[in-house]
Image (cartoon, rainbow, N blue to C red):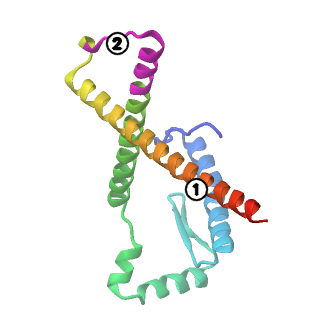
Amino acid sequence: MGNKVKLAFITHNTKRKAAFRKRKIGILKRLNEITTLCGIEACGILYDNNNPQPVVWPTDSGAKSVLSRFASLPESEQSNKKVNQEDFLWKRIEKDFEELKKEREETRKNVMAIIINHYIYTKEFNGNSMSKNDLNDMSCFIDENLKEIYRKMEGMKIESQEHDGNEAGVMNETKKQ
């Protein structure tokens, strides 16, 4: 993947204009791609401080058609399709926070697994250096793993009984012949 661009105002006028031209082409290209690939209607209106005429995609009449179709929707449907910057950012923050929470939980489980493996192989465990929360987490982690082991053992037991039952059935069929 390419380098991330620092999102900040470009103070150098020539560089800013060049960046705008490139980004404008990219946005219009993406609009064309999304309408073609997804079979949707879209339009774009880009205002440039240096040009009194906005850039309109696909055409003036095409943009008017999309906007009038949107305006004809009931207010409730319009608001379902609108996203303001603040709401978008808050939803993104919530999503990232949940992702971070899951990553922390996964990291915590990995740390507990490392501590247990260290104990299994070295018989060394220093519970005194762990906090009460650490010890509670360790206990929960061990309980979860034991439950998983018991579930797997039960599954193997059932599978073994089914296998033994099938063998007995085959042996009975062989004796009958």
Q: Residue at x 44, y 29 (%)?
A: 110
- Look at label 1 and name its amino acid: Glu
Within-10-Å neighbours for mark 1: few <14, some 14–19, many 20+: few
Across and down, in percent, residue 74 comes to 36, 88
Image-quadrant location for residue 83: bottom left
Q: Residue furthest front?
A: 176
Q: Is residue 123 magenta?
A: yes
Residue 68 sits above or below residue 159 on the image:
below
Across and down, in percent, residue 29 comes to 67, 63
Q: Residue at x 41, y 74 (%)?
A: 81
Residue 135 left/right relative to 54: left
Start and end of the magenta stretch? 112-127
Relative depth, front residue between 122 and 25: 122
Residue 87, numbered circle: none
The residue that mark 2 highlights is: 125
The residue that mark 1 highlights is: 162
Relative depth, front residue between 154 and 175: 175
Within-10-Å neighbours for mark 2: few <14, some 14–19, many 20+: few
Q: Residue at x 35, y 56 (%)?
A: 91
Front: mark 2 or 1:
1
Q: Main SS of the magenta segment?
A: helix
Q: Label 2 to label 1, Cα distance in Å?
A: 41 Å
Q: Secondary structure at mark 1?
A: helix
Residue 92 sits above or below residue 148 on the image:
below
- Look at label 2 and name its amino acid: Phe
Q: Residue at x 41, y 88 (%)?
A: 73
Residue 90 left/right relative to 48: left
Image-quadrant location for residue 97: top left
